[in-house]
Amino acid sequence: MCHRFAGAVIGIVALGSMIQPALSQDPIKIGVMFPLTGPISAQGGPERDAIKQAFDEENNAVAGRKIELLYEDSTGRPDVGLT
C-alpha cells in the first residue's frame, strides 16, 4: 500500500511540475498522516521519509508554487485518524 501511495504522490508531483506556474504565491499546504506512534509505527517513519524525499527532489514546489507538508500522527488507529 505504501508503495502505491508513494508512487501516486511522485506521479502527481511529476505531472504538476509540467504545469505553468500559478499566479498565487501562497504555499499549498498538504496534510499527511502516518502512524508515527502505536503498534504499527514501524511503517509510518519510512512512509513519511518517502513522501518527504519525493517533495525534496522537486524542491518542495509544484507548478511554481511552494508545497508545505503538515505531518500528523494517526497512532495507527482509524478513530484518531478521523479526528
Image: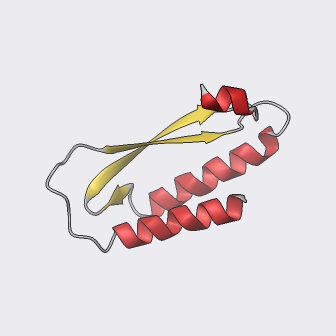
Image quarter where the C terminus lies is top right
**Direction from residue 6 to residue 66 in the image, left or right:** left
**Direction from residue 22 to residue 48 in the image, left or right:** right
Q: Residue furthest left?
A: 23
Image quarter where the N terminus lies is bottom right
Residue drawn at the location 46% of the way across and 57% of the way down: 56
Residue 55 vertical position relative to residue 27 in the rendered view, above or below: below
**Direction from residue 10 to residue 6 in the image, left or right:** right
Residue 64 vertical position relative to residue 31 in the rendered view, above or below: below
Q: Give the total number of marks visible in the rendering.
A: 0
Residue 39 vertical position relative to residue 54 in the rendered view, above or below: above
Quadrant of res 18: bottom left
How did the renderer colour the structure? secondary structure
Quadrant of res 30: top left
Residue drawn at the location 54% of the way across and 58% of the way down: 53
Residue 79 vertical position relative to residue 22 in the rendered view, above or below: above
Residue drawn at the location 59% of the way across and 67% of the way down: 7
**Position in image of residue 5 (x %, y %):** 62, 60
Quadrant of res 36: top right
**Position in image of residue 38 (x %, y %):** 80, 30
**Position in image of residue 4 (x %, y %):** 66, 65
**Position in image of residue 80 (x %, y %):** 68, 26
Pick the front one: 9 or 77:
77
Pick the front one: 9 or 66:
9
